[in-house]
Each structure stands twice: as C-alpha cells, then as structure tokens.
Image (spheres, helix red, strand yellow):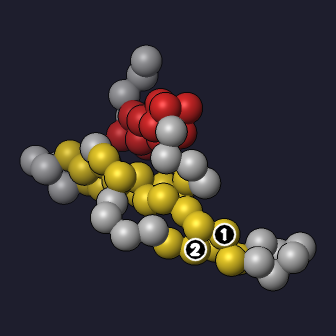
Amino acid sequence: MDWAGSTAFIIDRDTGEKVKTYIFVATLPCSQLSYAEATLYMNLSSWITAHNRAYAYFGVSM
C-alpha cells in the first residue's frame, strides 16, 4: 500500500479546471486483488481514509 508514482488529474465539472490528484494503490499479491483510489491530498487523513476503504474493498472488517 502506497501512493503511486505520477499524479493524475480530474476535471471539475463546475469550473472545467484540472485538479491534481494523488493515486493510492493497495495490492494483495497472493490473491492478485488490487485497489486504487484518487485523492485530492497526500496527507495523513487521506492515507488513513484510503487504507480503510481498501480494507473494506478486500473484505477485512475493522
């Protein structure tokens, strides 16, 4: 689990502005399951939220 290398962009539907996003990726190598999510910030709050969503996707209850 970590942030992927390059940043990506999303388009704000209201303004048409390109907004930079950071890609969080989690992979379970033995099952070959992967989870990816774009976040607006690369901070602790985004890190924890992305982990929680990845665990939910993988079916791990916290």
- Whether residue 10 can be seen here: yes
Whether residue 24 is situated above or below residue 7 in the rendered picture: above
Residue 62 in which image quadrant: top left
Whether residue 43 is situated above or below residue 61 in the rendered picture: below
Q: Residues within 10 Å of mark 2 (few under 14, many from 20)?
A: some
Asked whether 29 or 20 is in front, the reply is: 20
Residue 61 appears at what percent x and percent y? 42, 22
Q: Which mark is residue 19?
A: 1
Identify the residue at horizontal 45%, vertical 68% (top origin): 7
Residue marked by disc 2: 9
Q: Are marks 2 and 1 in contact (CB under 8 Å)?
A: yes
Residue 57 appears at what percent x and percent y? 43, 42
Q: Residues within 10 Å of mark 1 (few under 14, many from 20)?
A: few
Q: Secondary structure at mark 1?
A: strand
Identify the residue at horizontal 25%, vertical 50% (top origin): 27
Q: Earlier in the sequence, mark 2 or mark 1?
A: 2
Whether residue 25 is situated above or below residue 54 in the rendered picture: below
Q: CA distance from mark 2 to mark 1?
A: 5 Å
Asked whether 3 or 57 is in front, the reply is: 3
- Whether residue 53 can be seen here: no
